[in-house]
Image (cartoon, rainbow, N blue to C red):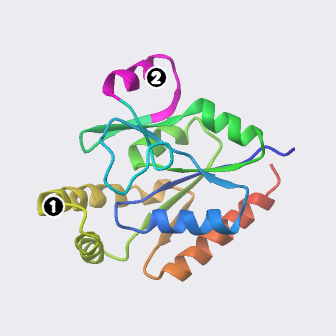
Amino acid sequence: MKKGLIFVISAPAGTGKTTLVRMLREEFPRVEESVSFTTRLPRSNERPGLDYHFITLQEFEKKIQAGEFLEYAKVFGHYYGTSRPLVDERTSLGKHIVLVIDTQGALQLMDQLNAVFIFLSPPSIDELKSRLRHRNEDSDAEIRLRLSWAEKEMKMASRYSYHIVNDNLKQAYDVLRSIFIAEEHKNR
C-alpha cells in the first residue's frame, strides 16, 4: 500500500479551516485529521479524543521529553502538539493526514517533514473580526488578541506552498480540493 501524505493547514481562528477540512474528509475517505494534544480545558462543544486529546501540563511535558511530538507550540497560554506515533501509524496505513496547526508548529515542520503546507486566510482583518464576533465564542479581549495574532500569522503565508483566501467557502474548497487531488497524483 502506498504511504499516505501529510497536509499541514494553518490559519487564523475564524477563517473556516475546520469546515474546509471536514468537507475534505467527507469527500475523500483516505483523509483523516490529526487530533492534537492540548493542555487547555475543553470547550462545551468539544469531545475528548475527537476534537483534542486533553492532558495536563505534566503529561504534555513528559511527551515532549519522550520525543512524542512532531511539533508543539504554546498558543494563548496553552500547549498544543501533534503526536508523531499517531501520524506515522496512520500514514503507514495509506491514510492522508491533515494537521491543522498554527504557524509556530508549521514552521517547526517545514525543514523536517515532507508535507504539503497550505495557509488559509480571510479576505481581510475586518472580515475576520466580523466572523469572530459572529461565532460568539470569545470575549472582546480574546478577539483583540486573536486579531493581533492573525496579523502576524498572515505575514507568514508566503512561507507555505499554497495560500488560499477564504472569501467564498465553495471557491476556497474547490481550491483546497484541487491541491489535494494534484498532490495525491504527484510522482514522489
In the shown orientation, is residue 108 left or right of residue 28? Answer: left
Residue flagged by tag 2: what amino acid is it? Lys
Is 161 on the left or on the right of 17, as rendered? right
Quadrant where the image shows the N terminus: top right
Q: CA distance from mark 2 to mark 1?
A: 32 Å
In this picture, is 92 found above or below 5? above
At horizontal 24% and vertical 39% (from top left) the residue drawn is 77
- Say what secondary structure mark 1 lies in: loop
Amino acid type, callout 1: Ser
Which is more N-terminal, label 1 or label 2?
2
Q: Is residue 60 magenta?
A: yes
Which residue in the protein does label 2 denote?
A: 63
Is residue 135 shown above or below 183? Answer: below
Count of number-bearing discs: 2
Taking depth in this image into account, of 13 and 25 the one nearest to the observer is 25
Element class at badge 2: helix
Magenta region, residue range: 56-71
Left-right relation of 1 to 9: right
Disc 1 marks which residue? 139
Magenta segment: does it hold 97? no
Q: Quadrant of residue 104?
A: top left
